Amino acid sequence: YTTALALAAAIKKSGNADLVLTGRQAADSDSGVVGAGIGELLGVPVISFAKEVRIEGGMARVERVLDDATEIVAVPLPAVVTV
């Protein structure tokens, strides 16, 4: 939470962003929640486990990896995507 709080504050201070890309998880605690926390604190959609990201007309179109398949999800910008 502390890391997500600090990063969300920095994003807000910089004037916000249309797209925030984060890693899936860190090597320190391995919890994988920072990206989702940033999205929650910014009040924007979060898509996790991205394989490919395309920006099309104010939307993020993301192919994400599931256990046994992939799916394509589209959300309006701004958004957070974990890769």
Image: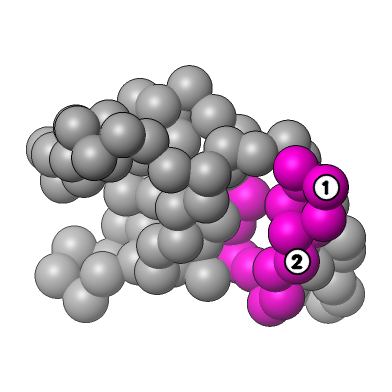
In magenta segment, residue 19: no
User: Is 7 placed above or below 40 here?
Assistant: below
Of 2 and 13, which appears nearest the observer?
13
- Give, as a single range, the part of the protein colored magenta: 47-61
Of 54 and 2, which appears nearest the observer?
54
Residue 62 spot, x, y in % from top left:
76, 61
Tag 2 and tag 1, C-beta contact below 8 Å: no
Query: Which residue lies at the image location 26% right of the left edge and 69% below the top edge?
Result: 26
Query: Which residue lies at the image location 40% right of the left edge and 27% below the top edge?
Result: 42
User: Is 5 placed above or below 53 here?
Assistant: above
Q: Along the horizontal axis of the image, is 50 left or right of 15?
A: right
Residue 2's disc is none
Is residue 32 among the parts visible in the rendering? yes
Work out which quarter of the rendered image holds the N terminus and state it. top left
Query: Which residue lies at the image location 19% right of the left edge and 63% below the top edge?
Result: 29
How many tags in the picture?
2
- The residue labelled by disc 2 is 54
What amino acid type should be assigned to the residue bearing mark 1? Gly
Residue 46 spot, x, y in % from top left:
58, 42
Task: Give the alpha-carbon distance from disc 2 to disc 1, as whole Å.
Answer: 10 Å
User: To which quarter of the image does residue 79 belong?
Assistant: top right
Callout 1 crowding tier (Cα within 10 Å): few <14, some 14–19, many ≥20: few
Q: Nearer the viewer, mark 2 or mark 1?
A: 1
- The residue labelled by disc 1 is 57
Query: Which residue lies at the image location 75% right of the left edge and 66% below the top edge?
Result: 54
Secondary-structure class at tag 1: loop
Residue 70 spot, x, y in % from top left:
85, 72
What amino acid type should be assigned to the residue bearing mark 2? Arg
Q: Along the horizontal axis of the image, is 28 left or right of 76?
A: left
Q: Along the horizontal axis of the image, is 47 left or right of 31?
A: right
Of 52 and 66, which appears nearest the observer?
52
In magenta segment, residue 53: yes
